[in-house]
Image: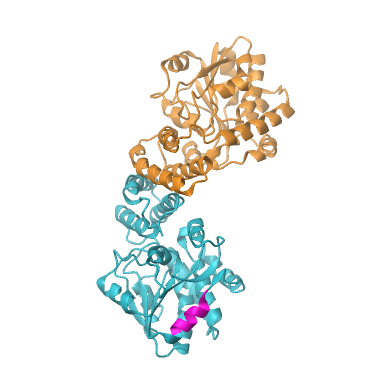
Chain colours: A cyan, B orange
Amino acid sequence: MKIHYECIACAVNQAQKIVEMSTPDLKKRREAMVFFGRRIGEFFEESSVPATDGGRLFLELYSFLGDDDPFRDYKRRSTELAAKVATDIGDVEDFGRALKLAIAGNVIDFAVGYDPEKIGEDILRMTEEELYVDESNELFEELGRAKSLLYLLDNCGEIYFDKLFLELIRKLFPGLTIYVAAKEGPIINDATVEDLREAGFEELANVVSTGSCLPGAPMEYVSKEFKEIFRKVDVVIAKGQANFETLSDLKDSRIFFLLKAKCRPISRELNVPQGSLVCIRGA
Amino acid sequence: MKIHYECIACAVNQAQKIVEMSTPDLKKRREAMVFFGRRIGEFFEESSVPATDGGRLFLELYSFLGDDDPFRDYKRRSTELAAKVATDIGDVEDFGRALKLAIAGNVIDFAVGYDPEKIGEDILRMTEEELYVDESNELFEELGRAKSLLYLLDNCGEIYFDKLFLELIRKLFPGLTIYVAAKEGPIINDATVEDLREAGFEELANVVSTGSCLPGAPMEYVSKEFKEIFRKVDVVIAKGQANFETLSDLKDSRIFFLLKAKCRPISRELNVPQGSLVCIRGA
């Protein structure tokens, strides 16, 4: 997916929140925003993928701020709250319900200013909603035929609902080799491989890194090892907006995108109302 | 006043709204925002005055869009609604109340996403509020001593409340030579000299142009004629945020700033709560 016209202002608004989280010093905040303003023009072109070029720009901002993870607190709170809600939900036996929980977990997103305190109530409300596009039957069938699955994770907190879904997938398709992938290091509120280890994913699947800190799985920046896994697996579950942004142009029928269409560009691209929950096949 | 850290994102958000008002074509909107992203770094430095460098950038965006006034409709609606509210209010006999109405009229501001439909109710509510900083007694005294007044106007719509105030000033200080200044041509929702003529200001005062389209009265961009008037008058009433941004660094005791502190940078600069109404002397 290429940038829509709203992506530039969204990147700048995120940058401002990053700067606010990183330092209370007004002078340093101003220097950082002036720096960001100077650099943005060098990153965004009409052919930019928002998650990729936005992510590269945020990493430059981190470096300017001398802060390798301004999201420490936001991620810790998301993790604590989501882990508690997921524990309360416990085992899920129904494929459709587990899939919907995983999609609902995608509501946790710093980019859209989400307050993690609302996770409990939001998750329960969303499991009552219908998916606006629901190709989960196809996903279920493909998993039945598949030997291997790559599950691309998205945000901290959200991963605890992915874990419930993965536990059921493992139970339903015991022969499946499962890879779960997260980021090499911190970027916005994305889960890193370290976050996966802490959440106990190693007991469920092979934990792998995309080999990049960038959001999603941009093929020009991921590692050779990751690319090899991506190439060979039978099915890919790609969670969240950034995975959609970086993989949708591949038109790959092995990929199923599970996400909440939180912003206007994504919902316009998918042709669904803003806020919709979708499980949609890559081709 | 120099930019605060929030001014960059604010400029980009305004640019997005400008682009939306100017064209429904998504491709053209994207081109325009990418263009804006490329140019922003060339305008904003830590020593930038937000209204001036933001204004210069918006004029470049207008030119890129091939649209010399994307605010036509917004300004027309503001004018119609404000003119009606001001007519209903009729003559005002009290200096403090007329001054407060003029300040309350400053609520009409595109930059902060103001919906002009709310003018009637907002103006009446605000005239019940106290000014957070009130140096209007000094203004009254200075006007009594003065031979000449320059009244710097701000936004379309708002000018109808300034007109009520000016009518009273003329009545109270009949010997005063009054100049009212507005912009040479369209910029955001600022009033132009043409708007002043349409609103009947020529019957009240000498209508003059700042000689520039830029918001406020930035001394490096206004005309020689305007500068001459500015230099020679005894008192200056400067309405709104942009006039404050461009003139506050002069520390000129002839200037009285009348405004509503709508954004965080302005309220931080003035050390007042956001949303405050103020009448504050330049030095």
Position above or below: B200 against A222: above
Task: Specify whether residue A249 is painted magenta.
Answer: no
Task: Specify whether residue A139 is painted magenta.
Answer: yes
Residue B166: x and y in percent read: 63, 20
Q: From the image, which quarter does the N terminus of chain A lie in?
A: bottom left
Residue A147: x and y in percent read: 37, 86
Q: In the image as oriented, which residue stretches furthest toward the top?
A: B175
**Residue occupying image coordinates x 35% and y 56%:** A53
- Say which quarter of the image contains residue B1: top left
Q: From the image, which quarter does the C terminus of chain A lie in?
A: bottom left
Q: Main secondary structure of the magenta part?
A: helix
**Residue occupying image coordinates x 44% and y 51%:** A13
Residue A195 is at least partly visible in this image = yes
Residue A85: x and y in percent read: 53, 76
- Magenta extent: A135-143
Q: Could you tell whether B39 is left or right of B100 in the image? A: left
**Residue occupying image coordinates x 54% and y 75%:** A100
